[in-house]
Image (cartoon, helix red, strand yellow):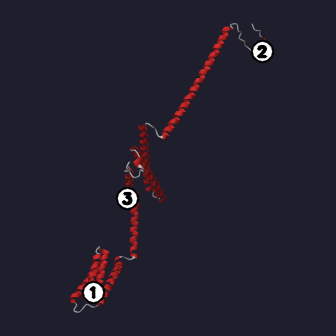
Amino acid sequence: MPYTAFALLIGLGARILLDTFTRTHEPNLRDILLVGAWQGVALQYSYKSTDYVLFVGLGILAKLFHDFNSSKDFNRLCATVLGSVVGFISTDFIAQVFEDPPVSTRGGRRKSVSQRSRTVQFRGTVDGDSERALKRRHAISDITSIDSDSELIPAKETMTPVQREIAALRARASLADSERRRYKEERKWAISQGNLARASQMKWEIKRYTALMEDFNKQADAKLVEAAQQNGRLPSQAATSSRTRVTHANGSARQTEANGARPSGSNQTFTKSSTSQRNGQVRNPHHRQFSGTLKSAMRDPIR
């Protein structure tokens, strides 16, 4: 509180009033300087403590103009201005000296205040830090408030409603991923500072934003598949994978048919050979079946 300027203003004003009522002669230079000093104190007090410095300054100028017009004394005008300047500067200097305590006496108080502020800051960090909690809630509200008409979606005028919904979900997932990466950096910083409570809290935030990102991506994929099914066509990747599966299926089917055809041909060959052997046995009823080695069969005459 600027009590110094106010005290000087009251004291000088009382002295001027006393001199005015008790003076029996014309005002001399001392009286003019005293009035000027009182005007300077009033100007300094209004400048530091109130919002009426402009009105006070205009009042002082009006009084100077009135005194000069009434007396036509230039020396009196200069003495009043000099007293006003001296009063303004002296009041400001005295206020700085008496209202601000010395640096040596403030050292202990500054130290205690800084220690108390650091303690409160650490307690706020461990307990949850309400400001950061408000920022986190604001970030989550920003992520969930993105809709199909958001400005974050480029070229939304050329998109269908389903495409805008998918783009909004992708934008939410991107913001969640940004928050996740930011909390990762904060967790690294907390670990480097040895603040394990803060690091544990950041780990929980990372898990939450990771879940949000995955959920938004899953919703976008589901919307994309649903839109493709409604349009009667699959996306390019799904169509490519389906063609690949059909090609593999056709190749497997052809291979199965070829493998199935080969045993049937061998069966037909075996049937034909068996039939020819039976016919040969029927045509040669006296055919002798040899046993033993090849030499004995050659020596044995044919009947």
At label 3, the amino acid type is: Glu
Q: Which mark is residue 131?
A: 3
Nearest to the observer: residue 119 or residue 176: 176
Q: Which mark is residue 295?
A: 2
Check contact, mark 3 vs mark 1: CB within 8 A. Answer: no
Q: Quadrant of residue 165?
A: top left
Nearest to the observer: residue 107 or residue 272: 272
Q: In which quadrant will I find the N terminus? A: bottom left
Q: Position of residue 59 (x, y in %)?
A: 27, 79
Residue occupied by mark 1: 68
Q: Is residue 104 left or right of residue 241?
A: left
Check contact, mark 1 vs mark 2: CB within 8 A. Answer: no
Q: Quadrant of residue 224?
A: top left
Distance from Cα at disc 1 to Cα at disc 2: 164 Å
Q: Earlier in the sequence, mark 1 or mark 2?
A: 1
Can residue 4 be seen by looking at this rendering? no
